Amino acid sequence: MGVLERAKRASGLSTPETLRYMCLECETQFDVQHHACPVCEAYDIRRTGRV
Ligand SMILES: [Zn+2]
């Protein structure tokens, strides 16, 4: 924990901890909040609750 975790976040690795948003249509997860899902273009983007 600590330095390693921060390094992983900074590098943008797609670990579950960093994926804070999810498309309810196709269940694709994102690290940033998109206005619409880039995969299926749905607007049902939801926070996963992990901050
Ligand atoms: Zn989607």
Image (spheres, rainbow, N blue to C red):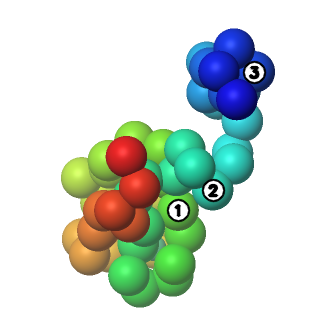
Given residues 4 and 42, the one toward you in this image is 4
Q: CA distance from mark 2 to mark 1?
A: 9 Å
Please rate how many residues cluster around mark 1, counting C-alpha atoms within 10 Å: few if below 14, some from 14 to 19, many from 20.
many
Compare marks 1 and 3 and give the one earlier in the sequence.
3
Figure quadrant of residue 7: top right
The secondary element bearing badge 3 is classed as helix
Query: Which residue shows up at 24% across the image and 52% down it?
Result: 35
Q: CA distance from mark 1 to mark 3?
A: 22 Å
Q: Quadrant of the N terminus?
A: top right
- Please provide percent x and percent y for residue 24: 38, 81
Q: Are marks 3 and 2 in contact (CB under 8 Å)?
A: no
Determine which residue is flagged by label 3.
Answer: 4
- Please provide percent x and percent y for residue 17: 57, 50
Q: Tell me if residue 17 comes above or below residue 24 in the rendering.
A: above
Q: CA distance from mark 3 to mark 2?
A: 15 Å
Query: Which residue shows up at 61% across the image and 27% down it?
Result: 9
The secondary element bearing badge 2 is classed as loop
**Of the residues shown, which amino acid type is indicated by label 2?**
Pro
Query: Which residue shows up at 48% across the image and 44% down it?
Result: 31
Determine which residue is flagged by label 1.
Answer: 29
**Of the residues shown, which amino acid type is indicated by label 1?**
Gln
Given residues 14 and 40, the one toward you in this image is 14
| Res 27 seen here | yes
Q: Which mark is residue 16?
A: 2
Please rate how many residues cluster around mark 2, counting C-alpha atoms within 10 Å: few if below 14, some from 14 to 19, many from 20.
few
Figure quadrant of residue 41: bottom left
